[in-house]
Image: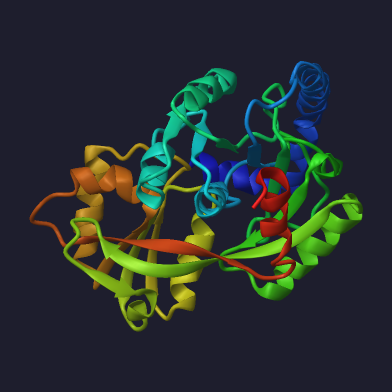
Amino acid sequence: MRESLVRRVWYGTGYDALLARAVLTPAEWAYGAVSLVAGAQRARGAGQSIVPTISVGNITVGGTGKTPIAAWVAGQLLERGHHPALLLRGYGGDEPLVHALLNPNVPVHTNPDRRRAALRAVADGATALVLDDGFQHRQMPRDADIVLVSADLWHDLPVRLLPAGPFREPLEALRRASLVVVTRKAASAERAAHVATLVQRAAPQVGVAVAYLAPDTLRRWDGAGVAQAAALSGERVLAVSGIGAPEAFAAQLRALGAEVEATPYGDHHDFSASDITALVAGAARADRVVCTLKDAVKLGPRWPAGAPPLWYLSQTVVLETGAAALPALLDRVVGR
């Protein structure tokens, strides 16, 4: 409910939304001023990275695909012969578990103090670091900034900073990026290209790529079944999502041909016993219960043994426009 109200304020075009954004304007100005000063101060003390370090971040609140892109980057570093480690702030508790499933051979270090996490990781043998959600964490040295912009969440409205809008920084902050990646889940390739054009106008010296976070494999949480995403075609699906862009998850399932009953929750939602009871009851109306991997790591261990099985849909990163830019950036930072 709270997140739904926030989204109406941020993206609404009616009188109530316009009035709410006007009321929040002084707070927006204060946030912007404090962020600008704090960011500059942090950047002055960053220094040099101790091993090749790549940040994956964004300039908006949630839902851009940081977790799959950061996991992809870590996997690419493994393929290049490095021993990468992922550095997380630890918010929500689900991301370390997700990364452990996506990259079992990549250690995850969780600490709000990224410098301490980096020192611990290097002491444990890491030869490269992936900083998850690090674009605003400017006191942490890095060799490259990959910044994500979601085509699914993009609205052609004036950019508004928190709390009047979803932006952490103005669009011009993308000029600090090494590469901007426009991600899409349910958004069309044309929509992603439109967003990429706007990004290029705001940061003309920065390369822009497009990545499709494509639905990949359906897996039962208990390990008793695997299916291709196409198996959802024609099925009634109870879609469970506590992520930054729940609408995109439901839209992806519909695009696969599923008849979707969406049950969205807030980002990093901590499922209660009553939530699970309601979901199990809802499963009686569906052929399959499907959640995101981020939700599966929290729901799965608590899913009742006698309930219909819990499935999760994994994603794969498909580089589209500017496909060579991201691997080339990694090669420049860590070498081949």
Give residue 62's position: percent from left, percent from top: 58, 44
Say which residue appears at 47% left-offset and 48% top-offset: 243
Give residue 87's position: percent from left, percent from top: 52, 32
Q: Nearer the viewer, residue 44 or 296?
A: 44
Q: How many marks?
A: 0
- Is 77 located above or below residue 109 in the figure? below
Q: Is residue 179 left or right of residue 68?
A: right
> In the picture, residue 150 is in which quadrant?
bottom right
Q: Is residue 276 left or right of residue 12?
A: left
> In the picture, residue 13 is in which quadrant?
bottom right
Say which residue appears at 32% left-offset and 70% top-offset: 237
Say which residue appears at 31% left-offset and 78% top-offset: 235
Q: Is residue 62 left or right of residue 261?
A: right
* Residue 165 visible to the viewer: no
Give residue 91's position: percent from left, percent from top: 47, 30
* Residue 77 visible to the viewer: yes
- Is 190 located above or below residue 263 in the figure? below
- Is 26 located above or below residue 285 in the figure? above
Say which residue appears at 57% left-offset and 36% top-offset: 129
* Scheme by which the image is coloured: rainbow
> In the picture, residue 17 is in which quadrant?
top right
Give residue 195's position: percent from left, percent from top: 77, 62
Q: Nearer the viewer, residue 62 or 261?
A: 62
Q: Residue furthest left?
A: 306
Q: Nearer the viewer, residue 104 or 276?
A: 104
